[in-house]
Amino acid sequence: GAVVSQHPSRVICKSGTSVKIECRSLDFQATTMFWYRQFPKQSLMLMATSNEGSKATYEQGVEKDKFLINHASLTLSTLTVTSAHPEDSSFYICSALAGGGAKNEQFFGPGTRLTVL
Amino acid sequence: EDQVTQSPEALRLQEGESSSLNCSYTVSGLRGLFWYRQDPGKGPEFLFTLYSAGEEKEKERLKATLTKKESFLHITAPKPEDSATYLCAVQAPDKLSFGAGTTVTVRA
């Protein structure tokens, strides 16, 4: 099956610093990747859609200058949380779109736990 | 606006006690309904995709069905290793909208 990896799996940083999270599709090419965040005991909330070679599309209420997304290749998208604050602490999950035509399926990475002190 | 509602929020089962989870949805232009399993601290694991009303899919003790307004995930004779949060999501057109999930706990 399609495999998506994320790095790092866990990161702790000080308030005001920036953190980069990588999302890779390991055995398929993904022109589209998605970034989600998940708070404890809540479901996944879509933050942005990342398209290879173009600007990301952000969901309403998500600050694009704070959550920088780069999709530089067909297998890699990165999310940078700039000037992180404690309220940015969350579980960040990426997914990659596999397949084509009417049957596009998303495969998820294992997630990155961000803790901002 | 797309809406996905899952019920119940939590389900506690005895090993071998079959049950069903519900996912009701309202969406324009449904391209697929997905079921995922999520273990604590991990990303969702793909289980099934259903594309049209009447479709059914099975995998081990799990069976997913779809109607025009809802989907059911049936767990037959569950085991403790089936304990997880089960997420339902609808795709329209390329974005997924998730329900809040049903947390299933199976006691031995």
Image (tube, rainbow, N blue to C red):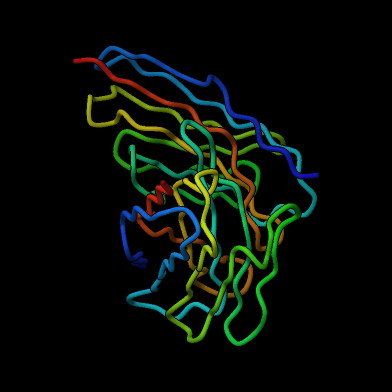
Note whether B35 is above or below A13 in the view shown: above
B99 relative position to A72: left or right: right
Estimate the x, y position of residue A72 in percent, counting from the top left: 51, 85
Q: At 42% across and 26% down in the image, what residue appears?
A: B103
A67 relative position to B104: left or right: right
Q: At 34% across and 46% down in the image, what residue appears?
A: B42
Q: Quadrant of residue A25?
A: bottom left
**In the foreground, B49 or B102:** B102
Estimate the x, y position of residue A64 in percent, counting from the top left: 67, 66
Estimate the x, y position of residue B19 in percent, counting from the top left: 42, 19
Q: At 65% across and 43% down in the image, what residue appears?
A: B53
Q: Quadrant of residue A58?
A: bottom right
Estimate the x, y position of residue A54 in percent, counting from the top left: 65, 84
**In the foreground, A111 or B93:** A111
Quadrant for the N terminus of chain A in the image: bottom left
A60 relative position to B15: left or right: right
